Amino acid sequence: MKNYEYIIASLPALSQDWKFPQDRNFSSYIEEIKALADGSDRKAIDALLSGFKDKNLNEEFYGKMLSCKDKFLKEYFAFDLQVRNGKARLSSQRRPSLRQPWRRQICWAERRHWTTSCGIRFPI
């Protein structure tokens, strides 16, 4: 279809006091959007939504997302990884008890993928 302006225009206008109608929820809006999108975009939507699942926030997931061909997904998850690593660094500086092995794994993924896949260097 690729008429995404119309899909976006059909979504509800969100405001500070907006709530889902009783017969609708987040999943129903996602399903409606996916029904109007084409096949490749449905896969991109699924990949984007998989980044919100805690079980996927690991080195393997970020490696897959940072090496995918979809430029939007690659840049989105590169930014997501940068924010999460920044948050982990800030937390560990404030509380030395948080310096755990998981922090080293996240930073390893940042160093490996940010300098090779995206060509951008970020300080650690």
Image: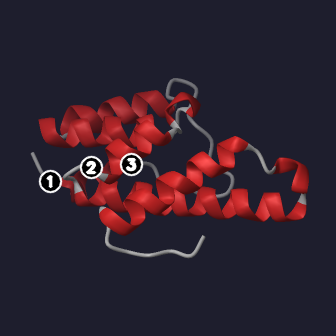
Q: Residue 7 carries which label?
A: 2
Helix, strand or loop at label 1? It is loop
Given contact means CB atoms under 8 Å apart, are the residues at marks 3 and 2 in contact? Answer: yes
Q: In what quadrant of the picture does the N terminus appear? A: top left
Given contact means CB atoms under 8 Å apart, are the residues at marks 1 and 2 in contact? Answer: yes
- Relative to 112, say whether 32 is above or below: above
Residue type at mark 3 is Leu
Q: Position of residue 6 (x, y in %)?
A: 23, 54
Q: What is the residue that sits farthest to the top in this orientation?
A: 23
Residue type at mark 2 is Ile
Left or right: 33 as drawn, with respect to 76: left
What residue do we see at 42% from left, 54% from top? 77
Q: Alpha-carbon distance for marks 1 and 2?
A: 7 Å
What residue do we see at 61% from left, 56% from top? 84
What residue do we see at 44% from left, 76% from top? 121
Which residue is the site of mark 1?
3
Which residue is the site of mark 3?
11
Helix, strand or loop at label 3? It is loop
The answer to whether one can see residue 64 in this image is yes
Q: Alpha-carbon distance for marks 1 and 3?
A: 14 Å
Crowding at dot 3, Cα within 10 Å, few <14 / some 14-19 / many 20+, comes out as few
Helix, strand or loop at label 2? It is helix
Towards the viewer: 76 or 88: 88
